[in-house]
DNA sequence: CGAACAATACCGCAAAAGGGTTAGCCGTGG
DNA sequence: CCACGGCTAACCCTTTTGCGGTATTGTTCG
């Protein structure tokens, strides 16, 4: 009896229960083998190098570190690496950054197990099965103004409760310049005050609070 | 051969993959049977009434509805209901409200599958196995000032980006009164501006953004 | 090269927020 | 009954924000 080699999968999620649950969903299948599970970006990279999986399932929220960084690290190590993002985030910026970092596709955690399995097999066979939702979200994002890295930096500090002056000190620029950045952020996000800006930015995945 | 009746478990989580993963972890055990899975508070209550499980696993983030409300609804239906909270939240206020609502215990999603199984069995046998972490968090909370319901209401509107005046209009009170509430919230949360207040409140689980 | 854009910086004005204080009303509980 | 805490409201003063300009520098891109 001839058995084809199984699809070797690496699971990355910072919650043990989710990790183990995902592993069980995958391991139930005859053609899939879970070769590792990681909780952080560093662990993920290390396990990736050691096990060289065919497909990596990656959460974006990895405690303190970012899943996007982990994707970049893995794809720098192996430009052909196939990474499927599995996350609860659905902000357009989350999706955009993940795809930009080289993810093969993007799946939210509210997906049927069978659909996930299908995606794993499709990605393994070289496809990039992007769902209509994801495509539509990316299309929407393309229509909206893009924040510059400096603006995101300022916004992140604003979100931490810093005043314009304090942001200026932190970034070693004048308070006046900070005010300009803040104004531009407001216009781009279509809001009129900082609290609302933070709210919108978090919802869109431009910044994250924790 | 005598087989004791299995522990009948209901899983409530708004993410299909997590729900199915949890169900697999549980169903692997010989003495546990998963009798249902729900995604929302309403579904949970309905399935609870129909299946009368021994133990309910409940996430706190149920899309729009709150897991705490679901716990209350279930315990109003059956005051002896045993509900285990399984969530990623770890803010002191989340834990407090869940326990207050009648949860048997509180487990974060970064738990070993075996530990979850142990907790399920302990809760089934009538124990309330509260972890040291949870106990400590509740102790910490007891030391901190409590926000009144009005203050939480104001804070929630602030978090949505409303100005003091707009909050006043919404709650039908004067802007001056809103300012008083905001000031009191600042003192209690030990912050000096609204953006930071929102940040701290979200981290502590006093309010949630989505 | 010229256009566009990002980042820097400044000015002025009106609005809003932050901070302290006082005070009346009401319900709960010692 | 009286004290206490919560909700309400107002006043004053200072600081910060939000919003409109203008302008210089450097870089990138067609």
Image (cartoon, coloured by chain):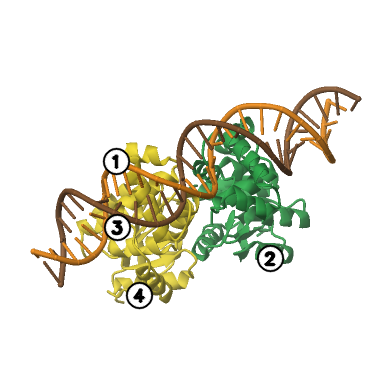
Chain colours: A green, B yellow, C brown, D orange
Mark 2 secondary-structure assignment: helix
Give the residue number, with chain letter if any, for mark 1: B173
Mark 1 secondary-structure assignment: loop
Give the residue number, with chain letter if any, for mark 4: B129
Q: Where is residue A176 in the image (x, y as percent from the top left)?
A: 66, 42
Q: Quadrant of the N terminus of chain B?
A: bottom left
Near-viewer residue (D11 or A41): D11
Question: Is the residue at mark 1 from the same chain as the one at mark 3?
Answer: yes
- State how far apart marks 2 and 3 are (Cα): 39 Å
Q: Which of marks 1 and 4 is in front?
A: 1
Q: Is residue A22 above or below residue A109?
A: below
Give the residue number, with chain letter if any, for mark 3: B71
**Is B34 situated left or right of A123 in this image?**
left
Q: Earlier in the sequence, mark 4 or mark 3?
A: 3
- State how far apart marks 4 and 3 are (Cα): 18 Å
**Is B121 situated left or right of A208 in this image?**
left
Mark 3 secondary-structure assignment: helix
Q: Residue at position x 45%, y 61% from top?
A: B190
Disc 4 crowd, CA 10 A, few/some/many (<14, 14-19, 20+): some
Q: Residue at position x 37%, y 40% from top?
A: B167
Q: Where is residue B113 in the image (x, y as percent from the top left)?
A: 47, 69
Near-viewer residue (B169 or B109): B169
Q: Pinpoint the chain carrying mark 1.
A: B
Question: Image quadrant of residue B82?
Answer: bottom left
């Amino acid at each position: 009896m001839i058995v084809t080699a199984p699809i070797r999968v690496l699971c990355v999620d910072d919650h043990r229960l989710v990790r183990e649950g995902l592993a069980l969903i995958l391991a139930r299948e005859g053609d899939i083998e879970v070769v590792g599970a990681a909780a952080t970006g560093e662990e993920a990279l290390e396990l990736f190098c050691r096990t060289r999986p065919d497909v990596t399932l990656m959460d974006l929220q990895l405690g303190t570190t970012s899943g996007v960084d982990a994707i970049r690290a893995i794809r720098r190590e192996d430009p052909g690496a196939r990474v499927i993002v599995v996350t609860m985030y659905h902000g357009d910026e989350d999706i955009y950054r993940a795809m930009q970092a080289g993810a093969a596709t993007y799946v939210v955690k509210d997906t049927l197990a069978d659909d996930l399995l299908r995606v794993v097999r499709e990605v393994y066979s070289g496809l990039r099965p992007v769902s209509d939702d994801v495509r539509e979200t990316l299309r929407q994002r393309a229509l909206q103004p893009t924040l510059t890295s400096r603006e995101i930096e300022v916004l992140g500090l604003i979100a931490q409760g810093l005043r314009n002056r304090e942001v200026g000190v932190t970034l070693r620029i004048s308070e006046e310049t900070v005010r300009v950045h803040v104004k531009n952020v407001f216009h781009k996000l279509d809001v009129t005050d900082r609290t609302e800006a933070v709210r919108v930015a978090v919802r869109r995945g431009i910044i994250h609070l924790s």
